[in-house]
Amino acid sequence: MKSSNLKIQVAEAFEPFLAPARYKAAFGGRGSSKSHSFAALMVAYAVRKQGFRGLCVREVQKSLKDSAKRLIEDKIRDFGVGSMFNPITSEIKTPGNGVVAFVGMQDHTADSIKSYEGFDVAWVEEAQTMSSRSLELLRPTIRAPGSELWFSWNPRSADDPVDRFFRGLTPPNNSIIRKINYTDNPWFPDELENERQHDIRTSPERAAHIWLGEYEPMVVGAIWNRQNIHSYRRSEIPPDLERIVVAVDHAISAEEHSDEHGIICAGRSPDKRAYVLEDATMKGTPRQWAERAIATYDRFDADAIVVERNQGGDLIRHTLRTIRPNIPIVEVVATKGKHVRAEPIASMYGIGQVSHVGTFERLENEMCQMTAAGFEGSGSPNRCDALVWAITELMPQMVRHGKRRETQVENCASYDAF
């Protein structure tokens, strides 16, 4: 890029960001030069436009040491344009009485953020930490003609607001969105390559997140990972589902601070893929969760409700049939722990046989806290267990279990599930 005799050099992968766009989003792992490239672009914009106003944003900025100020000052020096800028304590004065300011969004309200309405560019660093509230405040604030919003981050979760905004089902118009990793950085130093190799040897389960920008598992050793969940996510329910069930994993207690009653609706398509349609999990009395489960059954025109027989099975069946006497019920019997039952279902996600229709944040959090040694979160993973029961019922050919047998109750079947 050449502007007012200023030339900046960026990696080829970053070149699309040199074109005008309302949103510019670069995500990826460490050592990719995302921050260096945006800092260089900020300086180039300031040189090109007299009175340029730029904003460098973080969710939390305790001091300027946490900001990009030093990095931008380094770029000004490297480009040999120091005489055009005046770095002072809290900001950088740019040519034509402009400014580059540094803020933490957590410190602002809807009123205080209005002071930045006339700014040309806002760059959000470490955008994976930005809250939904901050994103909602910032976007309409930067409103000058031709203004741009830049975002750089290393993804943690598909549920982070910045990931939902740019990598969800409906990314914004007029956007440049790119994944950029160390492999795209022609200046990737030997020192970082040594660090990368060390992480591969000592923390292989985290290396993909650190260096390749893959989603971070909630816990080390999780049997699900967010990348698999996100990769096969869908925006619409397939029109030809051949079977739909609602699975319930009820909490033992209905007390206010008890675990939630897991209620998950899922379906199966003719090509033998499973789709998670809704997470209707709730706290409440037995009648309340039963009413919720039956309402979900009706809304999706489901074929049956799946319940666990050896976890208060008689009470569950009685509660459901008090509300709907002829509701079809499938009973399952758990003979092994939740995490053991979950492993074959998690493997189905790994080969793309399960899709979530939409995003189910709390369910997906539970899934990514389930390890081969057990659940690493707090409470009981009733959402996750209901998911496992639902997909086990829909995809029996993928899960080893005992012979299915009819019970004495009309419209009810049961089987022993490992």
Image (tube, rainbow, N blue to C red):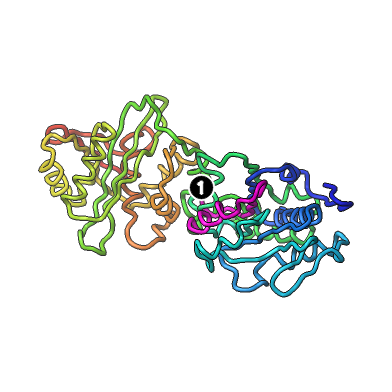
Q: Quadrant of residue 271?
A: top left
Query: Which of the 4 image quadrants contains residue 101?
Result: bottom right
Q: x and y percent of residue 238 in the render?
A: 40, 29
> Residue at left 75%, top 58%?
51
Identify which residue, 134 or 271, lies in the foreground.
Answer: 134
**Looking at numbered disc 1 in the image, what kind of residue is underneath it?**
Arg
Residue located 28% across and 36% down the image: 245
Where is 23 relative to 351, above or below?
A: below
Measured from the top left, where is residue 250 in percent x and y? 24, 51
Binning the other alpha carbons within 10 Å of mark 1 as few (below 14), some (14 to 19) or many (20 upward) gives some
Front-most of residues 404 and 282: 282
**x%, y% of residue 398?**
39, 35
408 over 159 or under it: above or below: above
Up-down: is 380 above or below 309? Answer: below
Q: Which residues are magenta?
A: 131-157
- State yes or no: residue 148 in magenta: yes
Q: Quadrant of the C terminus?
A: top left
Q: Position of residue 282 (x, y in %)?
A: 27, 52
> Is residue 1 toward the left or the right of residue 406 in the image?
right
Q: Residue 212, relative to residue 76: is it above or below?
A: above
Left or right, 47 with reference to 195: right
Q: Is residue 267 visible?
A: yes
Name the residue tied to disc 1.
164
Q: Secondary structure at mark 1?
A: helix
Find out whether residue 96 is within the magenta segment.
no
Q: Relative to residue 394, is residue 77 drawn left or right?
A: right
Number of numbered discs present? 1
Give 323 or 57, whichever is nearer the viewer: 57
Residue 188 seen in this snapshot: no
